[in-house]
Amino acid sequence: MHPDDPSAFLRVAAAQAVSVPGDVERNAHTAAALVDKADHAGADLVVFGELFLPGYHPPTLAARPASCDMEVDFYGEVADRRLDPVRAMAQRHRITVLIGASVHQGSRRFISTLLIDKFGKVRDVYHKQHLVEVERPMFTVGDRGTTLVLNGWRLGLGICYDATFPEHARAAATAGCHAYVTGGAFNVGGEHRRDLYHAARALDNTFYVVFAGALGGPPPWTLSGGSAIYDPEGRPIDRVPTGAVGLAVADLEAQKLDETRRAHTMLADLRVDLSERTTVEADRGA
């Protein structure tokens, strides 16, 4: 194995639960209960869905930014007391949490992934780089990717629509990531695309994919969940049953990662000089 390979394994939990639109404090209590459950499962990391803290409900996000958003200071830290329940649980169990939020920094508003570390410190670590149409009037596009390093594992972060672009996950893989970790919010009816995207990103890049899906909510913004963890060949290792509240839990294994990348060498064989093309007209006359 390469000296930069991660520790033997990392146990990850992808959470699935219903958020109440606009009620950050209540949703933080929900998250805290799932972090407690993840600790009982031995998890090192717990991942929550897109905008889990304010709820993925565009009308509420547009009408009530004061109740939905969190302030990020100059250093990227968040001191919002509404997060105390989940902060305390992360600190109690010495567990790392990634959770979706709406944040503002200065005049800009972002769909964010917050990192709550094992000491209870909260940092704004990633901003969604691809916004869907309903989000664009409210939020600013993120301008850079993020790699989170945990126990030697390099985790590329994404949020929902990011994962529909192969280039986003590929950028994480070529930057040396061992896994791609995303929180999403897919409407009911999009289950086929949701599952295909994340399985494909795993196989494309021969790395693990961890997806935490937001669940429930009022129509027409009812969300389908789909929390699952995929191995480096795109097979689901564990998933939360449809419509259920709970956790998908799996070990990311360094040996499995190494074996897969030795057998399937797409990353090593990747060509970046394919922009030149020849156009051939099949119906052109003599």
Image (cartoon, rainbow, N blue to C red):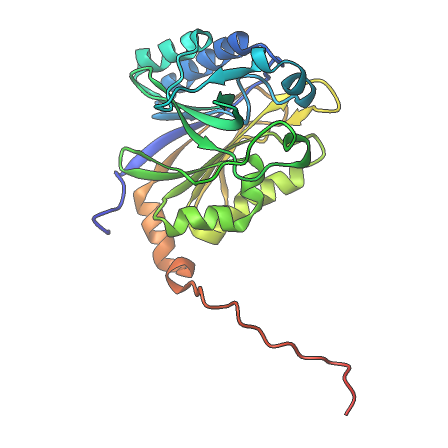
Left or right of residue 264, residue 182 in this image: right
Q: Is residue 233 visible?
A: no
x and y percentages locating residue 119 in the rendered image: 29, 16
| Residue 143, image x, y percentages | 47, 39
Q: Residue furthest left?
A: 3
In front of the other: 116 or 136 = 136
- Does the image show residue 102? yes
Find the residue positioned furthest to the front.
107
Give 281 or 219, whichever is nearer the viewer: 281
- Specify the quadrant of the image occupied by residue 83: top left
Question: Where is 90 relative to 173, above or below?
Answer: above
At which x and y percent is residue 95? 33, 20
Residue at screen point 31% across, 43% down: 254
Q: Reply above or below: 232 against 117.
A: below
Quadrant of the rendering where the C terminus is positioned: bottom right
Vertical relation: 101 (above or below) 177:
above
Residue at 43 percent across and 65 percent down: it is: 271
Q: Nearer the viewer, residue 139 or 225?
A: 139
Task: Residue at 51%, 11% (x, y): give it.
Answer: 30
Specify whether 141 is left or right of 43: right
